[in-house]
Structures are given as structure tokens and as C-alpha cells.
Image (tube, grey):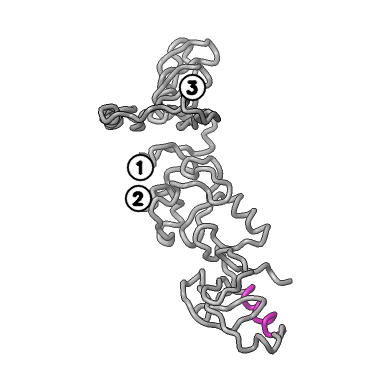
Amino acid sequence: MDIHHIQASLSSSASSSSIEPPLSESHNTCAADRESGNFGCLHYRRRCKIRAPCCDEIFDCRHCHNEAKVICSLCDTEQDVQQYCSNCGVCFGKYFCSICKFFDDDVSKNQYHCDECGICRTGGKENFFHCKTCGCCYSKLMKDGHRCIERAMHHSCPVCFEFLFDTTKDISVLPCGHTIHLECAKEMESHFQYSCPVCSKSICDMSRLWEKLDKVIASTLMPDIYKNKKVWILCNDCGAEGEVQFHVVAHKCLDCNSYNTKQTIGRRPTASCSSTTVPEIVS
């Protein structure tokens, strides 16, 4: 791990003897000078080091640790990072990246190093392109049609919260441009969730469901007390706002015919505060 969370132990005593005196101005100045120093390594600028759990030695970061030495599994010779053992000559890995210090004998993954990403990826360099706006590699099938989002992969998955940029799991790019683990997207669909967890736009073609809802709403009569009730809605798909007839089932956007909407003005106090009101599929 690059970052170690350190939990400070605070005394539960409220006695005055446990309270430290305020820092002097000169002390604050020294602290500011230290914070402005040139700390860290070639990989990260920061004012901390890590202790590697495998060897109990201290390094500036995990990459510095990986660049230090390798040990041959066959002859136990410790040596500089290289593809072939300096003692017995065995190949450490058919794929070797001297930049990432990465080895792998399974070349069926079609590994390649992306200079702009700064890491090794799988799938074959000929099949991918690097989008400078999104800051990551995408399949060439998406080159002319994907929606760019600034640093789209440099965040955690909105479902499982694992960092996406260097994940080893398959990634799904939603129509809105946001990214998510493929298995997390499938898990959402299994629970009838069809909107992006980030922006609430629909993640697939929902026209068949909207047609079913049209029929359900047409066959579900509202009590007289609600016949003239109007509500303001915001469409999560097209962003349009408007006043529509209130209905207990769903509210339809008059601009794009989507039911992926939420009430804005006129929301009842007991209504859900969820950012999306996409209903479950009507059987």
C-alpha cells in the first residue's frame, strides 16, 4: 500500500496536566519550512515513508521497494532488477517491463506498457488507445464514440470503492462516460438498478420499460383528490425540468419520454430522498 493510515491515540483524561501548551510562532515557522521541503522520491512527492511488510525495511514508496532487488526462486541469488538471473540465467518472466519492474510468464494476456498511463496493461497495445482527457486506455472500438470525462478512471468504483485506474478487474464504461467495475454493473442490474451511481443517467436503452410504464399508468386511475395535482420534475437523462401530472407509479419527462425522473418542487415530506426514481421492471 502507498498510504498507511495512522490512528492517533487520544487520552480520555480531561485534566489540565494532559493538555499541551500552544505552539510558539517560531515553532509554527519551522513546521512550515519543513512542510515546504523537497521530500519523497521520483514516484511521489510526500513527507512520509513506508515500512514494507515483507522485509520490514523502510522505503519512500512501494515502487522504490520493487525497484530495489529481486531474488531468484531457483538459486536464491539476490540481484538488481533484470529479466534474467545473473547467476543461473533463468528467465524471471517472459514478459518483463523495466519501467514497472513487472514480470509475468503468462504472455497470453498480451501485456504492454502505456507510457501515458505509466503502468502496464493487458489486452494488446494494438487494441487500445490512450485518451488524454479521460487519462486512461480504452478499446479502439470506443475511439470515435466514447464520452470524455476528465480523469474518468482516476477514482474509486462507485459501488465497491476499489480504485479503478490500476485495478485488475474488467471495467465497464457507461454511456454517460463514468466508469465502474463490470461485475459491479452486473450486480446493479441483478437488483434492477439501471442508472449510473454517479450522475443517475440511464445505463442502457430503457425504451421498452418506458412503454410498459405508459400502459401501467394508463390503466391505474388516480383518486379524484389527485386528478388536478401537478408536480415539478427533473429528468436525470436529458436534464429537462417541467411540471407534470402527479401519479403514484412514476413521472414521465415531456422532453425525452424517460421515466428516470425525480420530483423537485412539490415533493411530499415522506417521499424518498434518492437521487433517482427509476422503478423496477413491471412484469
What amino acid type should be assigned to the residue bearing mark 3? Ala
Q: Observer-nearest residue: 153 or 89?
A: 153
- Percent x, y for residue 222? 69, 85
Helix, strand or loop at disc 1? Answer: loop
Precedes in sequence: disc 1 or disc 3: 3
- The front one of 110 and 232 is 232
Seen in the picture, residue 160 relative to 43 is either above or below; the reply is below
Kindly indicate whether the residue at mark 1 contacts the one at mark 2 (C-beta within 8 angstroms): yes
Mark 3 burial class by Cα count in 10 Å: few <14, some 14-19, many 20+: some
Question: Comparing marks 1 and 3, which lies closer to the viewer?
Answer: 3
* Residue 14 picture location, percent across and down: 52, 31
Near-viewer residue (281 or 114): 281
> What residue appears at the point 48 percent right and 40 percent down from the top-left corner?
166
Q: Where is mark 1, residue-wise? A: 116
> Can you identify the residue that label 3 sits on?
52
Q: Neighbour class for label 2 at 10 Å: few (<14), some, many (≥20)?
A: few
Q: CA distance from mark 1 to mark 3?
A: 27 Å
- How far is the residue under mark 2 from the one under mark 3? 33 Å
- Residue sitting nearer the eye, 117 or 110: 117
- The boundaries of the magenta stretch are 209-219
Secondary-structure class at tag 2: loop
Identify the residue at horizontal 55%, vertical 13% (top origin): 74
Instruction: Point out residue 239 in the picture as x, y percentages from the top left corner.
Output: 46, 72
Residue marked by disc 2: 132
* Residue 147 in which image quadrant: bottom left
Percent across and percent down for residue 104 are: 51, 29
